[in-house]
Image (spheres, coloured by chain):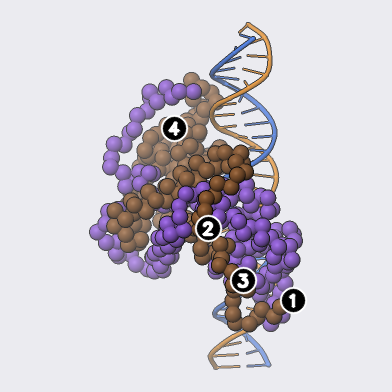
Chain colours: A brown, B purple, C orange, D blue
Amino acid sequence: MPHADEIATPAPMPEAGALALDNQLCFAVYAASHAFARTYRPLLERLGLTYPQYLVMLVLWERDGLTVKAIGERLGLDSGTLTPLLKRLATAGLVTRSRDAEDERQVRISLSDAGRALRAEAAGLPTVIAGRLGLDAGELKRLRREIDGLRLALDAAIEGAEAASKTDAGETDAVA
Amino acid sequence: MPHADEIATPAPMPEAGALALDNQLCFAVYAASHAFARTYRPLLERLGLTYPQYLVMLVLWERDGLTVKAIGERLGLDSGTLTPLLKRLATAGLVTRSRDAEDERQVRISLSDAGRALRAEAAGLPTVIAGRLGLDAGELKRLRREIDGLRLALDAAIEGAEAASKTDAGETDAVA
DNA sequence: TGCATTTTCATTGTGCGCAATTTAATCGGG
DNA sequence: CCCGATTAAATTGCGCACAATGAAAATGCA
């Protein structure tokens, strides 16, 4: 190798570090998302659910009988992800899948009795997680809104992203 | 296509909603993480990288010649994820994989010339994303730290999570 | 009405992400 | 020095996540 970099000092690049991992907001979000999933996993395992399946159940507990498309819009997932996931939920006996009689293109997802009953089992989960975070309800709400703002800004920017080659990045040299 | 299919099933659960999707901090983080990935994807495609591959490159650009284990600790990934990913990076000619002579168990990942050169191509990416977020550097830094705090709190709580059956969740009935 | 277009879901293929297991190398106590 | 325990990667299996494609049903417009 050209340089003997086995010496103690790290950082071969003394540069400011727009590319520094620890400065990346995207990595913080990526890592936090995995941390949530890791935290939920053992709790959801007792309910026989994966984390994405839990999200689908949250949607259905709010409004039963949605179409695959409606669930997908709520969660930002497409049929390629949802179709096999919903089939697994159906195999587990938590939902039923049936073609809509009025529009045979649509598949409606309905909770079974077991699926409805699972809601009580899951009711305590968010509070357990919130407790581990050590934040009060107000802080959690504020943070959630800020992070929702990130998603909204990114999704809004995706529209016309390829249309605009003009760098509208502005003058911030901040790091995301 | 207007709505008009909502006749049959109005909201079955009028309850306050610790389980309401829109109250879930975890879902906000989950959705934001996917939004970042969706935003980066077309930009990274030009570099021939996926988003996780980009994270590995960020790590290697900070310090070359790390072991698989060290990369995994930095990113929170295990060899089951990293081994095939690193093989793809090697196939793409961005890194080389070699057994450590001192400890044959370890595999060291070293940047190729092409891998080092790619750094310049990626240098502008974070600023592009930051521009789309419409936040200044200070806001980005504050948010990143708060979200890092979430990950730290969750990871800390994972230790002894199954050991402690006592609910030390405190008195908040907030929602995560 | 006829037919192209659009919508909805399913399918295929690639690439994570992680649990569980395997293999090989190293370490450590007797 | 030997042998069990530990460690690092690799492997296997399953479940997302998403692009691309396909098929069937509904829509719309000449």
The amino acid type found where label 2 is placed reads Asp
Task: State the mark number for residue A1.
Answer: 1
For residue A161, side relative to residue B13 (left or right):
right
Counting from the top left corner in percent of width and height, residue B160 is at: 39, 69
Q: Nearer the viewer, residue B14 or A168?
A: A168
CA gap, disc 4 and disc 2: 44 Å
Check whether the beta carbons of the residues at disc 1 and disc 3 lie within 8 A of each other: no
Q: Nearer the viewer, mark 4 or mark 1?
A: 1
Tags 2 and 3 on a common chain: yes
The residue pinned by badge 4 equals: A66
- Specify the label residue A173 is tagged with: 2
The subunit letter for the residue under badge 2 reads A
Which residue position is annotated with label 3?
A13
**Quadrant position of residue B52:** bottom right
Tag 1: amino acid: Met
Please state the chain letter of the residue tagged with numbered disc 1 in the rendered image.
A
